[in-house]
Amino acid sequence: EVQLVESGGGLVQPGRSLRLSCAASGFTFDDYAMHWVRQAPGKGLEWVSGISWNSGSIAYADSVKGRFTISRDNANNSLSLQMNSLGAEDMAFYYCAKDVSPTILVVGGFDFWGQGTLVTVSS
Amino acid sequence: QSVLTQPPSVSAAPGQKVTISCSGGSSNIGKNYVAWYQQTPGTAPKVLIHDSNKRPSGIPDRFSGSESGSSATLGITGLQTGDEADYYCGTWDSSLSAYVFGTGTKVTVL
């Protein structure tokens, strides 16, 4: 059974940093690209970042470029998102999602999602 | 502001059919695979269609995806009360080098 479990969310002050993690199991992790998707309460889905199977291709939404860094550890089946300079606009549920493809250059869709972790930005 | 436009809501009676449109452009739907996701309140999204027209195991054939030019459509036949949810289209945008989601459509079963 495929499982994606996010952790690391919580309350953070504006301008500070937070690191999210996603533990993957139930599939061959290094065969697939992985993504982070966020959703502010009551709002739609927003793609944040994606990373190919071997970390050779990485992409970010313009809204987080230069502030967020995605990475993966295939040896430990984990995905991470380092978030710096957080602002109110970053407050959302953050989901880890598995791609159906190995590369972010051909994204067929996200076939498995974690339960999400909530990031709250407030002083 | 999303590059993929969906109607805010659609509704129909149980057993009927609904279609949800997703309008994009030549750099996204016109060029790349489309996926459709279903989300009920308080839960993570679930994929219904990936690679434009492929249904994962466990997704009934009441759900179907199609494309024409730079638009995509999700069809739901034999509408059930359990289909009440928000639906999103998504695809890669080659100009933005980013994955983009549609604005979302709320399906109501009358």
Image (cartoon, rainbow, N blue to C red):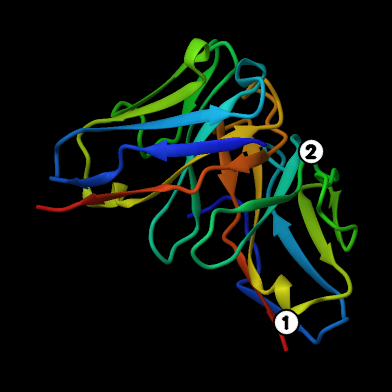
Element carrying mark 1: strand
Residue at the spot of label 2? B51
User: Residue A28 location in percent, x, y?
Assistant: 66, 20
Q: Distance from label 2 to label 1 (Cα)?
A: 26 Å
Residue drawn at 76 percent across, 38 percent down: B33
Residue at the spot of label 1? B11
Mark 1, Cα crowd under 10 Å, few <14 / some 14-19 / many 20+, is some
User: Residue B104 location in percent, x, y?
Assistant: 59, 62
Q: Quadrant of residue B52?
A: top right
Front residue of B71 and B85: B85
User: Residue B105 location in percent, x, y?
Assistant: 63, 68
Is residue A23 positioned above or below A119 on the image?
Answer: above
Residue drawn at 52 percent across, 13 percent down: A74
Is residue A85 positioned above or below B22 on the image?
Answer: above
Report whether B54 appears left or right of A5: right
- Quadrant (top left, top right, bottom left, bottom right) of the N terminus of chain A: top right
Q: Quadrant of residue A84?
A: top left
The subunit carrying tag 2 is: B
Q: Earlier in the sequence, mark 2 or mark 1?
A: 1
Residue drawn at 38 percent across, 30 percent down: A21
Front residue of B57 and A71: B57
Is residue A106 positioned above or below B42 on the image?
Answer: above
Report whether B42 appears left or right of A11: right
The subunit carrying tag 1 is: B
- Whether labels 2 and 1 belong to a single chain: the reply is yes
Mark 2, Cα crowd under 10 Å, few <14 / some 14-19 / many 20+, is many
Q: Quadrant of residue A34?
A: top right
Q: Amino acid at mark 2?
A: Asp
